[in-house]
Amino acid sequence: ATVGHSVADAMAGLKVNVTGEPRGPLMETSGNLEMPNVNKFPSSKLKLDEFFLNWLSSLESQKLVLSLLEDAKAGRPLQGPVPTSSTGAVASAGVSPLSPSSTQALLSHSGASLAATPPLSPQKAGGVGSFRDTPPGSPLSPSRGSRLVPPGTPPRAPTPPGAKSTLRSPALASAAKENSAADRSSTKENETPSDSSYLAVPRFYNGTESGAFSEEQSCAKLKLAKELFGGKELDVDGFKVLATDVCELPSFFAPLIMHRALGTDPMDDSSSDNDQDNGGSVDPDGGSPPGGSPSAHAVVPGALSYETFERYWRTTLRKYADDNARAFHVLRGKRVLDDVCDGLDEHHTHRNVHTQSLEHADFRPVIRELLRTHPGLEFLKDSPEFQDRYLETVTYRIFFEVNTCWNGKLRASEFRKSDLLQAMRKCDETDDVNKCLRYFSYEHFYVMYCKFWELDTDHDFLIDKEDLLRYGNHALTYRAVDRVFSQAPRQFTSGVPQKMGYEDFCWFVLSEEDKQNPLAQMYWLRVVDLDGDGVIRPREMLHFYEEQVQRMECLNQEPVLWEDVLCQMMDMLKPAVDGEVTINDLKKCKLAGNFFNVLFNLNKFIAFETRDPFSIRQEREEPHLTEWDRFARGEYIRLSMEEEEDGDDGTGWDETMNDGGSL
């Protein structure tokens, strides 16, 4: 009875009512945020009071409360309860005699520092078993990493069962501090970049050896290479057979493979004059990045011996049995990132940090060799300016189609998923480069460059908004062109404000003339998506269609009501959510290009509505051709006829070149 009165008086001093008299909600005194509306349910409130009185009447609870009160009066830090089993050991999982919220309420009234005695979280209230019974997850698991490991801490091996407890018992806390201090001292003595703390992280892949040639295959390749070398050194022309038969790459890879084996720079650029003065010697397994200028000349590699090739094969090429991986590595080389190495400490300097992506300059050595040796491009040998433009155009087309991230960094996964290597082999095997519609067609380059040249009236290799409005006989609306120059679909690379360079134009024309391409659909979706949330809604469509209606009225065309147009477009696209068009909806529709033409390209909109059966039959007879292929073929015929007419009149492109142009 004395204990009961003392507890009641003490609890009254802590503003905890135990009498059942009307009082304020427990939330106001305990800080508990779990039941904010307890006063709205009187019956539940009475039941809670009953549970509290039953808990307070137990002897164990009274001892706990009295001990907490004595600690509070003496000014000692308050310690939370430690659940124990019947044997006196710490329970692995059990219910504390004091709930987490009640513990937080009592401890919050003490004068102890919050940092010294943090409240028990619900995750830790379950005891040691709440962590130990959880199966170990990935080292990159966000939930476990954010809760247990501070940011920037290297991953550690999982704690073995029984090694450490997270409860706030004084004895366990002191033991944990001793163990932690011992761990830190041993870690500091032995910590290196390759320490066990790093090795504890399981590997998610087996490295490049998993995709390497077997020993039997490698020996067979080297035996064939030794026969092709014939005991002498090979030049570029002699090495081409070995590049196709042994390395299984296109023949125009031969000079680059030789440079990789010799450790020399494949491109001669003004920025690397010092390297050329020193003989061009660079990193022995790949060299420095290729010349940064598109007009850089290719360097003829020195003669290659069998011993040098064997060393390069065993150290590098043997690791890549997959053709795409091997081609990717030959193009990339093994370049050390200087800016990364400068930021590493002394333990990391011995590590090789390699680029894992391709840039525009990485394709220039092989395209230079293609221009030098391909029969279909032989007529360009006396036109170095056109060679540079062709090289640029092919590179831009590769990055438009393959680099789906649009960041100028072509990754190995993107290279592997593309058809680039197959297109390279087809170009290497055929004498007519125009049959290689993917990437390398000269006719396609000719159309793109001439279209750009027609718009660039001042021939400064830049076009502005007014120039682009003239594209396709003023086919596009002002609002669409404004969005393109606001760089909504893609950031310009020209470096001049409100000016579009040749690379930017290549992306534009490929997107405009082949709207069935998923990348082109993403390009125009970003144009129409005014709020940038990845969804096109009716209000955004109406913003562009309003200008189309005005243009139809100016051309004496009967405008189509917006309600009718919207209904037809939704029936055509069949979006997953009615009135919300996403990129997935566009990819599923075979007429997605007409959706964009209705909004901002009046010429193609009218042409689709009035198309003749002959064009429909022609499309069905050539299903392998894309919209871009058909457009480029028609434009090339038109441009060729115009050039012939200009040649008959005694004028033409030669006079344009004399006027300061490059065409």
Image (tube, rainbow, N blue to C red):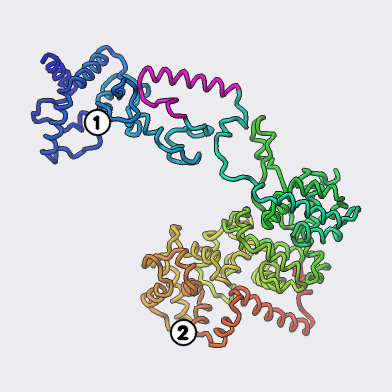
Q: Residue furthest left?
A: 21
Vertical order, 319 against 388 (above or below): above
Magenta part, dominant SS? helix
Q: Residue at x 62, y 28 (%)?
A: 192
Vertical order, 199 against 291 (above or below): above
Per the image, the residue denoted by label 2 is: 556
> What percent of the width, then of the height, locates residue 85?
30, 24
Q: Amino acid at mark 1?
A: Gly
Per the image, the residue denoted by label 1 is: 31
> What percent of the width, then of the height, locates residue 311?
80, 46
Q: Residue at x 30, y 25 (%)?
A: 83
Disc 2 from disc 1: Cα separation: 73 Å
Which quadrant: the C terminus? bottom right
Q: Amino acid at mark 2?
A: Asn
Which range of residues does the magenta coloring cover? 160-189
Residue 58, quarter of the rendered image: top left
Residue 650, quarter of the rendered image: bottom right
Q: Residue at x 32, y 17 (%)?
A: 77
Give left or right: position of 524 versus 567: right
